[in-house]
Amino acid sequence: ATQVGTATANGAGNYSITSSALSAGSHNLTVKATDAAGNVGVASATTVVTIDTTAPVFNAAGSVPADNATTIAGESDNGTANVANVSVTLQFDSPLGSVDGSKLHFFNANNGFAEVAHGAVTLAVAGTTTFVTTTFATAATADNDHIIVNFDAGFVADAAGNQTVALTGFTAYDFYNN
């Protein structure tokens, strides 16, 4: 077995280590106590630790509305009126631990790339996938407006604290408000 660190326990028997010896993935760890006289005890029961260094990845293909969608469910298509809000669900490839809604942005390409307000941002987990849901107000848009979705680095993070990279550009994820 390879030693990955040492620590001194406090009076309650608690300890922690920081180790750079463990690579990403799953590891089986045991602990041995050494008393003041240098006597080494037997190994503890095995504890499985997973080192996660991979940031969540956005999946435009699994998001709703679909990337490049030209028709959004619930939208009127009469050229004059829109529903008040359109629901948007962004899909990520792994479970998330947090979201910072201030880092999510909707832009209207037909209106000088003006930012369009969005509602509260929430997380929903389904198996190994996480969905981030919100709405955007259609009052600032018209039928057939080109809506572009961007987010800043750190918009979402997994339970290990790995933050997503920024989604930028005019076609990374977009749809039309019909």
Image (cartoon, rainbow, N blue to C red):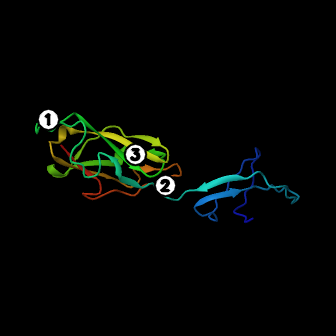
The mark found on residue 122 in the picture is none
The mark found on residue 100 in the picture is 3
Q: Secondary structure at mark 3?
A: loop
- Which of pointers 3 and 2 lies earlier in the amino acid sequence? 3
Q: Residues within 10 Å of mark 1 (few under 14, many from 20)?
A: some
Residue denoted by label 2: 162
Q: Secondary structure at mark 2?
A: loop
Residue denoted by label 1: 81
Please tell me whether residue 149 is drawn above or below residue 123 in the rendered image. Answer: below
> Residue 58 appears in which quarter of the rendering?
bottom left
Residue 136 spot, x, y in % from top left: 27, 40
At label 1, the amino acid type is Ala
Q: Residue at x 33, y 40 (%)?
A: 134
Please tell me whether residue 11 is drawn above or below residue 42 in the rendered image. Answer: above
At label 2, the amino acid type is Asn
Q: Residue at x 60, y 64 (%)?
A: 23
- Say left or right for 112 vs 167: left
Q: Residue at x 49, y 46 (%)?
A: 97
